Amino acid sequence: MNSREGQGDGVEDSPRGRVEMIPAKRRALILERLRREGAAGIQELADAIGASLSTVRRDLEHLVKQGALERTHGGALLQSTERATFEPDVALAAQLRRDEKHAIAAAVADGLRPGQSVIFDASTTVLAVARAVVARRLPLTAVTNSLTTAQVLAEAPAVQLIVPGGTVRPGSTTLVGRPGEEFLRGIHADIALLGTHAITGRTLTETALDVAAMKQAMIAAARHVIVLADSSKFTTASFCTICDVADVQEIVTDDGAAPSVLAELRGLNVALRVISVPRQGRGRG
Amino acid sequence: MNSREGQGDGVEDSPRGRVEMIPAKRRALILERLRREGAAGIQELADAIGASLSTVRRDLEHLVKQGALERTHGGALLQSTERATFEPDVALAAQLRRDEKHAIAAAVADGLRPGQSVIFDASTTVLAVARAVVARRLPLTAVTNSLTTAQVLAEAPAVQLIVPGGTVRPGSTTLVGRPGEEFLRGIHADIALLGTHAITGRTLTETALDVAAMKQAMIAAARHVIVLADSSKFTTASFCTICDVADVQEIVTDDGAAPSVLAELRGLNVALRVISVPRQGRGRG
DNA sequence: ATTGATCATGAAACATTTTGACGAATTTCG
DNA sequence: CGAAATTCGTCAAAATGTTTCATGATCAAT
């Protein structure tokens, strides 16, 4: 009764091929997909990853035990509070689109001029810009509400760094609310670099109200707003609206975005930069 | 694969033999690949480097012990880069008087009660208290002007963390000035934990004006001020004055302080706690 | 210069974990 | 209620981890 029989007999391309991917990366892929879509079915995940249903179930079980997501009949939901702690799998999920983010960040950093005042949003893509700024030794006046970005920028002697302050969102290193939002009202920066959770049609959305409010304050505080969104962000809308695409001046994304999406954005009054990413076999599938 | 093969090519460093790559370079390659991909499998690494699986495993083991990455089944993950961005200076300073600071911090953390509001100053000793708070899972409302302390406290789900904000002092991760100082005026915390650069006679001093001003704001914002000072701090005064010893309610130090200093402090209206440090023949001076 | 100790490397033997498949029990929905 | 889908438990194969050992290089001492 071994499975060998079915294999030798079936000449059709039964996908019995093993996917060479370490479990942690597989779980990270699941998390990333959930963060984009909000929910996903077992079969859909198995198909996307290239693993069997059993494996996907066990991965979900693992992630549930970590508190990162919630199981439903037939699929899984992202844990709404996103209090996903700093577990390895979650940390890896943040790194998944690394090539795209890095390429976008480098392009944006090249566009910054010495002496400008720049607002850095709490976002992994914007964090990559901060790293590029430090590497380039760009002298800037920087404002950020992310503890992580702040620590990166604090290492640059040429950067004058201001943290508006606020309350830390549980499970993250993002500052929201008072006193940061009010402080931003008194700020007039040259540029704001914003990440977003999703861009749908002409609407930028975010998962939480307080984060959206902070981003709105940043938009109001800058003369030129640049939205950094890798191509995975063009998906279904998140919980609450940040603003309309017309409220920002520039959108930077990578060349993985669907042409229809890009065409729709081009019709609006927004500068659209599409960065080509050299793909080097990042993930199979 | 035989190691002999590599002997023919001229490697001037090693006369002959199998040195295809120095271990340090191999590990650097592993780290670089991990930074690119976020994760990597053992076989994949062995293939990329040209070493055997055993060697790659041993390298990973070595890197784990060094804290650079995390092992998973089948591969390795980069240690969460968000936490990996710590200041080398801070790491160094935390090593000095480590036992003393740890003992003081543990004693202070034991004195904190669930639900209290606590102000954490920017200081390595106070940072140690923050670590103890996280380890004890103490539910607190925390306020800090140190980016490092904030990141530590942000990992504790039970801690509500508020960052007053301000400008980062160059070369450090300390926030000073606006808007933090003004925000602190509206705060009334139960406890403030303060470090200091020096205690001379009955005067607390600090090296820079803006840092001293921030500490003064913290003192004004708390009902009970605790100064954490290991015994090396009882020395010559620094540049500018923070306050008088009478302005704080409690001083915690270790038993390495000179008896004359302790006697002088005991004469003032301040609770003085001397923590005995178990010295293990390290004789740190 | 030779010898012996020490260490890194690679390979093999063995224990453990993971994975995919299958059937039975359970749940969902018309 | 009944059909379809889903989940659960189990099992064998494959992959991975762990331990151990032999080989060769480097180094200190004779």
Image: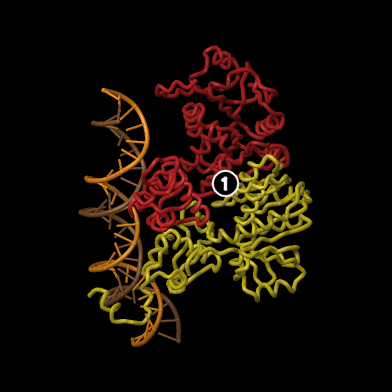
Chain colours: A yellow, B red, C brown, D orange
Of all residues, the one furthest to the top in this rendering is B260
Q: Which residue is mark 1?
A: B160
The residue sitting at 48% across, 33% down in the picture is: B110
Q: Callout 1: helix, strand or loop?
A: strand
> Relative to the observer, which residue lies in front, B236 or A8?
A8
Quadrant where the N terminus of chain B is found in the figure: bottom left
> Relative to the observer, which residue lies in front, A92 or B231?
A92
In which image quadrant can residue B251 be found?
A: top right
> Relative to the observer, which residue lies in front, B202 or A96?
A96
The amino acid type found where label 1 is placed reads Gln
**Can residue A217 be seen in this snapshot?**
no
The residue sitting at 59% across, 52% down in the picture is: A169
Rendering coords of residue B196 (x, y %): 61, 27
Rendering coords of residue A263 (x, y %): 69, 75
Rendering coords of residue A222 (x, y %): 76, 55
Looking at the image, residue C21 sits to the left or right of residue B181; the answer is: left
The residue sitting at 42% across, 49% down in the picture is: B9
> Up-down: is A104 above or below B196?
below
Rendering coords of residue A16 (x, y %): 36, 73
> Up-down: is A131 above or below A12?
above
